[in-house]
Image (cartoon, rainbow, N blue to C red):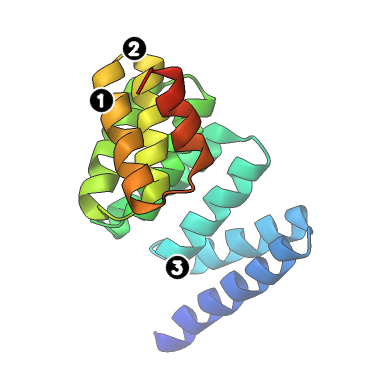
Amino acid sequence: MPAVAGDAHGHATRAQALAKSGKTEEALAEFDKAITIDPHHAEALYNRGLLYQRERQHQLAVDDFTSANGLTPQRAEPLLARAISYLAMDKFKEAATDLDEAVQADPQNALAWTTRGQAYERLGDKDKAKASYGRAIAIRPKDDAARSGLARLGG
């Protein structure tokens, strides 16, 4: 059994290197191999999701982030990534739900707070948006996205 997991890890590692050098198709093929060998390889699912997201294939990204989240509950990264794809798909409620969970999982994640502010701003909930942007700025004072969000809302 460990040899199989090692094979999946090897494919995932190669996929990462290919993705970094801009070889998207080859990277996706390597991630596919890793996930076929080990369907519970959360890191491969998450990273393939990021690649899909970069290619603006948001539903495929959401599917991978959902799988990764199921395998690694209480981690902010898959939730944040899925929320970013939801925002790109104009699914603001789904994004806000994921971001609520992400900031609980990692309260010091400034990007999660900023993105949560954007989701709530798009939903028209100015108070939650302002509070989220404020938390992001408290964590990362030079967060331009949070600062401009707060300025837009008159905060």
**Residue at label 3?**
38
Residue 148, compared with residue 22, is above or below; it is above
The amino acid pointed to by label 2 is Gly
The amino acid pointed to by label 1 is Lys
The residue sitting at 24% across, 43% down in the picture is 101
| Quadrant in the picture for the N terminus | bottom left
Residue 24, compared with residue 90, is above or below; it is below
Taking the image as shown, residue 79 lies to the left or right of residue 87, namely left
Taking the image as shown, residue 26 lies to the left or right of residue 122, namely right
**Residue at label 2?**
124
User: Which percent across, then down, holds residue 133?
Assistant: 36, 35
Residue 69, compared with residue 94, is above or below; it is below
Single out the mark in the foreground, 2 or 3.
Answer: 2
The residue sitting at 25% across, 20% down in the picture is 127
Q: Are marks 2 and 1 in contact (CB under 8 Å)?
A: no
Among numbered discs 2 and 3, the one appearing first in the sequence:
3
> Which numbered circle lies on residue 128?
1
Distance between the alpha carbons at the discs numbered 2 and 1: 9 Å
Between 57 and 98, the one nearer to me in the picture: 98
Instruction: Assess disc 3: are there few (<14), some (14-19) or many (≥20) residues with their C-alpha within 10 Å of its C-alpha.
Output: some
Distance between the alpha carbons at the discs numbered 3 and 1: 40 Å
User: Which percent across, then down, holds residue 90?
Assistant: 48, 19
In the image as oriented, which residue stretches furthest toward the top?
124
